[in-house]
Amino acid sequence: MEAIDRNNLDKLKALNNKFVLKIVIEFVTLCKPSKVIVITDSEEDIAYVRHRAVELGEEARLKLEGHTIHYDGFFTMANHDQARDKGNTQVLVPKEQEYSYPWINTMEREKGLNEIMEIMDGCMEGHECVIRFFCLGPKNSKFSILALQITDSYYVAHSEDLLYRAGYEEFKKLNGSNNFFYFIHSSGNLFGDPPVTKDLEKRRIYVDLQERRVLSCFNQYAGNSVGLKKLALRLAIHKSNNEDWLAEHYFIMGVHPKEKNRTSFFCGAFPSACGKTSTAMLPGQTIVGDDIAYLRVWDDGYAHTVNIERGIFGIIKDVNAKDDPVIFEALTTPRETIFSNVLVKDGTPYWIGDGRLIPDNGINFSGSWNKDKKDKDGRVIPHAHPNARYTIGIEELENADPNLHNPDGVPIHGIFYGGRDSDTMPPVLESIDWEHGVFLGASIESETTSATLGTEGVRMQQPMANLDFLVVSLGKYLKNHQKFGKRLKYPPKVFATNYFLKNKDGKYLNGILDKLIWVIWAEGRIHNEFEAIMTPIGYIPKYNDLKSLFKQYLDKEYKQEDYIKQFSIRPNKLLEKQIRIENMYIKEKDMPAFFWYILKNQRGELSRIKDKYSLEEISPFLFEK
Ligand code: OXD
Ligand code: MN
């Protein structure tokens, strides 16, 4: 270990943890970096990370103070490192389990480890390797899990400072135990200026449940490289499903209805790029988290939750002064912010849908760019990538909720499940009870987006928007949800939302800010303030309540004809959906019985109303008693 000097070694030794030392020795020996830098929680060490990210060219300074730009690898619009790589993400399992999870990429552990260790042999040659310590969740909290990150990317290390709580001092409190997750990441061979991953064909993300670690190499995109984000979510799902809590792809927000002097807390799961961050950021509300939450049964009878992060790695598309005023303001004023994969001209970042005039040329994720630029396959290169991102601390935002670091988390009153669904589900729907809520979450469908590699616009099942990260069988996962709710005296009310319903001409039936109304209506339902209409798929709002909420919150006249279009029940579309859901879940071996019971009942009810009305769309008024 000549790569580590005395000072850095002392920092490691001060932790008094032989497991940390063993991991560092194993991976430094394998990856062969030229130097090892250990980062503590000190201001000086953290400033060093920020400084090196720029000095090494992984980030470049922009015009506004604190703003930097980072680029991930790009060859063509179809071959790049600008999104999560689901295909090369594998869960390593014992041989006999390899084919038992129909929805999860699994690989035999020994085989996977041999393969990735070979790829990682020497992958950090000529690079510095940074050792980082973080705390997933607030400090001194029952929820939290410590995490060790080893990476040769200062961009990854810097992003983690914005996104997670420092944990070097917390590691000391472990008293030598191995009760932590760990992540090894390398960008692999780099080329160009800025330096990006060259050999994308060697990109691998292997989740080793047995050792509570994830090995990730030959990539830079944060969804693949930042261990504490989606890689830790996978480890947490494994742990929580073998214990008695939940690890979810949830935002957490405080909802503050006007003139009521109260706050209700909601979680929400939406597949990537389906309105998750913008729901958590709705004007007038507060944000606790926008991506990942741990939930526990609390002794006040509620489920409590914490944001395991303290920052946002958000999609920067259609963020403009009108539709996303809070984020737009934060991103256009000086503060520590990393932009990735956007267009830069004269030190100013531009992204898709920012409401500004797009410059004709500049630097973007494809290098030097002009508006006619095409890739090798003849595909037009947009000025910014549709999955371009910003990384920022939540406390930088004026709507940060004061409970962000509360070790007890916040009580959850409601949960939203939403997808990108152009023709099936109404904009908001309330479940009948907890189990029906689990069913609603389990039956989210969504059209694919640019947040993952592959074709966009394909309808996919997205249970709890967590399928990409599942490492246990869906049946086990749903049973864990069911049991969790049963243990609560006050289970949250569950709502399904759909912001993407379209008319026959492909035009959206809702305005971007209308989601505020669905959220406020749901909050009112928690407090028994609105009546609702029972339909075969759950409760929907009454027209008059929405009409006054639209007026009060958006100063908008909500027309009855719009309500009818949005909230009509579509029996044929819904019956088709039921078949798709059945086809998916039938492949699972250990499904909970309640799921099939609800599916069967709904199918019966939908067939009944289909025969009764013989209509493609049944007006909500026909369900009103
Ligand atoms: C994300 C994602 O970045 O889910 O949050 O892809
Ligand atoms: Mn996410």
Image: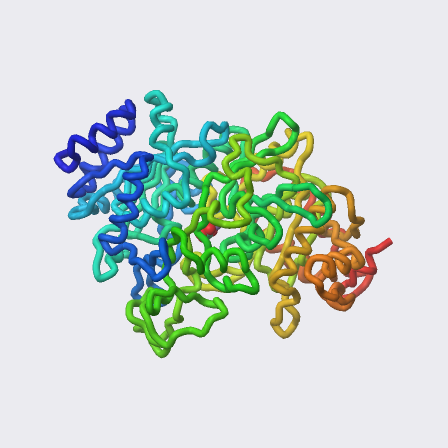
x, y (%) of residue 420?
57, 59
Q: Is residue 68 visible?
A: yes
Name the image quarter holding residue 374: bottom left
- Is residue 378 in sight in this rendering? no
Name the residue at 33% across, 39% down.
Answer: 183
Q: Quadrant of residue 624?
A: bottom right
Q: Residue furthest right?
A: 625
Q: Residue at x 59, y 44 (%)?
A: 267
**In this orientation, which residue lies closer to the viewer: 79 or 311?**
311
Q: Residue furthest bottom?
A: 372
Residue 461, position as x, y percentages in the image? 55, 53
Q: Quadrant of the N terminus?
A: top left
289 up-or-down from 450: above or below: above
* Quadrant hosting residue 5: top left
What residue appears at the point 27 percent right and 50 percent down from the top-left corner?
A: 53
> Up-down: is 215 above or below 223?
above
What is the x, y in percent for residue 411? 61, 35
Does 420 appear above or below 141?
Answer: below
Horizontal placement of 209 versus 413: left or right?
A: left
Q: Residue at x 54, y 43 (%)?
A: 288
